[in-house]
Image (cartoon, grey):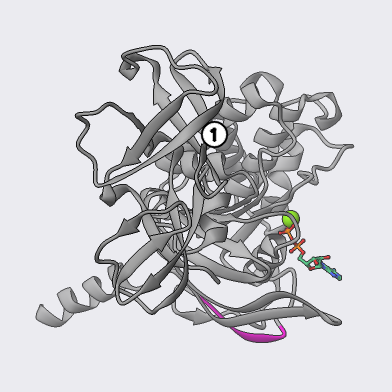
Amino acid sequence: MVNDRGNQLNQKDSPLVRLRDLSKSFGRVEAVKSINLDIKSRDFLAILGPSGCGKTTLLRLIGGFAEPSNGTIEIGGNDVTRLGPERRPTNMVFQGYGLFPHMTVRENIAYGLKIQKVSQSEREQRVDDVIGLVRLEELADRGTGELSGGQQQRAALARAIVMRPQVLLLDEPLAALDLKLRQAMQEELRRIHNEIGGTFVFVTHDQGEALALSNRIAVMDEGNIVQEGGPEDIYASPESRFVSTFIGEANILSGRRQNSVVTLAAGLDLPSSSGPDGAVILVIRPEAVQILSDNSQVDVRTEGTIVDKVYLGAYVRFQIQLSSDEFITANVPTLNLSKEYFSGDRIAVGWAGKDHRILMDS
Ligand SMILES: Nc1ncnc2c1ncn2[C@@H]1O[C@H](COP(=O)(O)OP(=O)(O)O)[C@@H](O)[C@H]1O
Ligand SMILES: [Mg+2]
């Protein structure tokens, strides 16, 4: 009994997908550089990074559509590094959907089951189920050429889900859709993930989409995973200049640290910041910057000149020039503004010490 329970615990805690030192080179281009990553069962993981950073290559490695130059891939405790895609418990939705244009939606979805020689009665049942799941009942007997972008997206998703993969791989699934449809499909993907309880890994270059959809984000830059964590962690605690500016908007102020005191170029000292001496940056989100009145209590306070002001309804966006000639953006909720400010006004700005991060300037 004790052993049984121990095993169950182990299985529950051990990752479903385990990448170790995984790399892939194309000639002299190192598209993926020695990546280590664990993906847990039921994760909705976003692989987020700019175009060309190696996202598609990483996804293709997991799915078995590319062979690694080095490293290993384990899924469900089995080494699948040398197995082809059809022998892995994965399925991939490709960026252009890759539907068969001469087949109906239903035929597209049934195709993989037919290849696997699943009986006709089971096939029909499973195809009907996923058609319901992605809400394509009305269009099931149309040719895929007659579908809109969003409908093709659903058909491609259904074709992958019907195979019941342990891990569903999605390469920029929503990139081709316009903004409204993209937001609607984000909700759909969340619902489908909840309903089937599977493990989704999706690639995107859109940080808003990664934040909205996933429970974990792996941020990629130039073939490396530079940070990995929950969306709130990554947004609140970026560990590098790249991550702080790629995910959300960030003000970056330069400074130096000496004996645990940071002096900013903008002319103020921040006490007690442990870490090595040298050049540092301070990262502060625009929504954390306040315009101060004389009696405001904040940890960090400096002065500047308003050089631009834009009214955006819910908030007002100020550009403020500091004594260092650096600029800082403040998004101040309109409701919090006690008086009107104008370009050219000298003002005090500041923020709570807990809201900024000090990083080595690498
Ligand atoms: N089949 C290939 N042959 C040669 N170079 C490739 C191939 N696939 C990708 N690359 C290169 O690898 C790098 C990463 O590409 P990719 O994984 O497609 O990035 P992303 O999906 O993040 O845009 C790029 O420099 C790209 O040109
Ligand atoms: Mg890509």
Task: Tell me, yes or no, whether the highlighted magenta stretch contains residue 245.
Answer: no
**Which quarter of the figure is the C terminus placed in?**
bottom right
Q: Is residue 73 magenta?
A: yes
Residue name at image x 34 percent, y 73 percent: 14
Query: In the rendering, at what x and y percent does residue 113 appear?
Result: 66, 52
For this orientation, the residue located farthest to the right is 102
Q: Which quadrant of the frame does ligand 2 lie within?
A: bottom right
Seen in the picture, residue 45 relative to 136 is either above or below; the reply is below
> Which residue is located at x 27 percent, y 44 percent?
352
Which residue is nearer to you in this view: 110 or 283? Answer: 283
Q: For numbered disc 1, what is the local secondary structure? A: helix
Q: Look at the image and give the residue range highlighted in magenta.
A: 69-74
* x then y, percent, for residue 167: 53, 59
Residue found 43% across the figure and 65% down from its top: 359
Picture coordinates of residue 99 (x, y %)? 80, 42
* Viewer-closest of 216 and 133: 216
Instruction: Locate residue 83, reporting x and y percent.
Output: 66, 79
User: What residue lies at 15% left-to-right and 82% top-to-bottom?
Assistant: 3
Instruction: Specify whether residue 240 is in view.
Output: yes
Q: Is residue 39 above or below residue 323?
A: below
